[in-house]
Image (cartoon, rainbow, N blue to C red):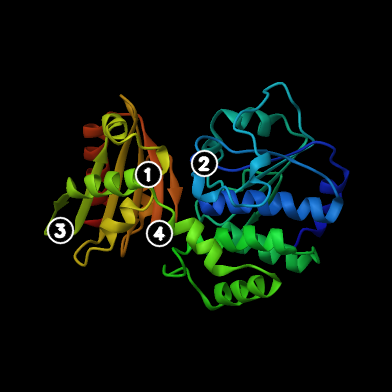
């Protein structure tokens, strides 16, 4: 798989937009910046980048990220829109209008629930991350991976493998990481920025959320709820919930864990992590998606009703 059949489209497009999903994580941000860097290096062409919603300060070190915008002009018509790490088109929210109006679209992702919504689709479900998909695309197409692009790709891969800890960490992941280090990535620098620059409020907020967790079915199911008032109490940002589901899944007895985050009084975001059940299948019921071990969705209900819906679906699918 390579970019050669779309390279002319990229080359001939005057206005290009790169966009990822709302509430972007390390893979989304790293991949967005990697595509920007690679296109700029190959064609000396600057793209627009749209980053939807809050960006954690931890990722501010990423090359070119400061050029990304958090708002967009609905009246614009792009020659090309490239989505990265977008499991389903509704994950770009209202920016979908820009995608729909674009003359050409490219969809680059690694989620097994992706339904090939672009004109050109590069989907590799067995890849650890969109960063891994991009590395292979660039290498196979003969695109240069310079130090800036390498740092973006390394960040994407590092974060979506949980610091090379998750079961998506394959031999190929380590080979790619080694190549990126050879190009100039400083692993310690990236790790510190991604995992060790946490504020006191962040740590206290996460401890509070973990301490009010609920355990069911002999501790096989674990979940916690996060209300808007909880965010206000700790002056917390949206990304402060990152890692909560992983902490609950790490408990020895837990088979499946989830976090219900209140976005509005009747709108909740679900983050789910599983050891042995298909989290993507459960979240797909609510219009979400992801991977077997890690998935998410949005439910148009209050927190209590959302918890019940998720629990009912877990039990229906997995007979826990």
Q: In the shown orientation, is residue 34 left or right of residue 283?
A: right
Q: Which residue is mark 3?
A: 219
Quarter of the picture containing the C terminus is bottom left
Label 1 neighbour load within 10 Å: few <14, some 14-19, many 20+: some
Q: Nearer the viewer, mark 1 or mark 3?
A: 1
Residue at x-position 22% and y-position 45% = 208
Q: Is residue 319 visible?
A: yes
Q: Residue 55 vs residue 314: left or right?
A: right
Residue depicted at 27% across the width and 29% down the height:
229
User: From mark 2 to mark 4, how far is it between C-alphas?
Assistant: 26 Å
Q: Is residue 127 visible?
A: no
Label pair 2/4, CB-CB below 8 angstroms? no
Q: Earlier in the sequence, mark 2 or mark 4?
A: 2
Which of discs 2 and 3 lies nearer the camera? The answer is: 2
Q: Mark 2 falls on what kind of element? A: loop
Instruction: For mark 4, give the secondary structure.
Output: loop
The residues bearing labels 4 and 3 have C-alpha atoms spaced at a distance of 20 Å
Q: Which is nearer the eye, 13 or 248?
A: 248
Between 94 and 159, the residue placed more toward the observer is 159
Q: Are marks 2 and 1 in contact (CB under 8 Å)?
A: no
Asked whether 58 or 179 is in front, the reply is 58
* Residue placed most toward the observer, 281 or 42: 42
Q: Position of residue 144 (x, y in %)?
A: 79, 64
Instruction: Give the quadrant of residue 52.
Output: top right
Which of the two marks, 4 or 1, is nearer to us in this view? 1
Which residue position holds label 1?
240
Q: Does dot 3 land on a helix, a strand or a loop?
A: loop
> Between marks 2 and 1, how big is the CA–CA gap?
11 Å
Report how far apart the C-alphas of labels 2 and 3 lie in the structure: 33 Å
Residue under numbered circle 4: 292
Disc 2 designates what residue?
Answer: 55
Q: What is the x, y in percent for residue 98?
A: 67, 30
């Amino acid at each position: 798989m390579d970019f050669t059949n779309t390279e002319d489209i990229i080359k001939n497009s005057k206005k290009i937009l790169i966009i990822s999903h709302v509430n972007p994580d390390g893979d989304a941000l790293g991949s967005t910046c990697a595509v920007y860097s690679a296109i700029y290096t190959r064609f000396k062409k600057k793209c627009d980048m749209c980053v939807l919603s809050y960006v954690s300060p931890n990722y501010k070190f990423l090359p070119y990220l400061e050029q990304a915008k958090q708002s967009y002009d609905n009246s614009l018509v792009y020659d090309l829109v490239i989505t990265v790490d977008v499991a389903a088109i509704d994950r770009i929210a209202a920016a979908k209008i820009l995608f729909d109006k674009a003359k050409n679209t490219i969809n680059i992702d690694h989620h097994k629930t992706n339904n090939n919504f672009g004109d050109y689709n590069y989907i590799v479900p067995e890849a650890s991350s969109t960063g891994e998909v991009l590395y292979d695309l660039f290498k196979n197409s003969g695109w240069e991976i310079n130090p800036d692009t390498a740092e973006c790709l390394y960040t994407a891969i590092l974060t979506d493998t949980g610091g090379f800890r998750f079961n998506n960490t394959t031999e190929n992941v380590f080979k790619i990481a080694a190549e990126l280090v050879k190009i100039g990535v400083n692993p310690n620098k990236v790790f510190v920025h991604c995992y060790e620059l946490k504020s006191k409020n962040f740590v206290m907020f996460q401890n509070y959320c973990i301490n009010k967790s609920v355990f069911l079915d002999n501790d096989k199911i674990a979940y916690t709820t996060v209300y808007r008032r909880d965010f206000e109490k700790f002056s917390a940002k949206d990304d402060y919930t990152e890692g909560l589901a992983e902490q609950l899944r790490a408990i020895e007895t837990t088979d499946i864990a989830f976090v219900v985050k209140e976005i509005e009084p009747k709108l909740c975001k679900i983050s789910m992590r599983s050891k042995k059940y298909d989290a993507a299948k459960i979240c797909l019921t609510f219009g979400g998606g992801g991977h077997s071990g890690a998935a998410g969705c949005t439910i148009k209900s209050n927190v209590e009703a959302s918890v019940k819906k998720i629990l009912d679906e877990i039990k229906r699918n997995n007979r826990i």
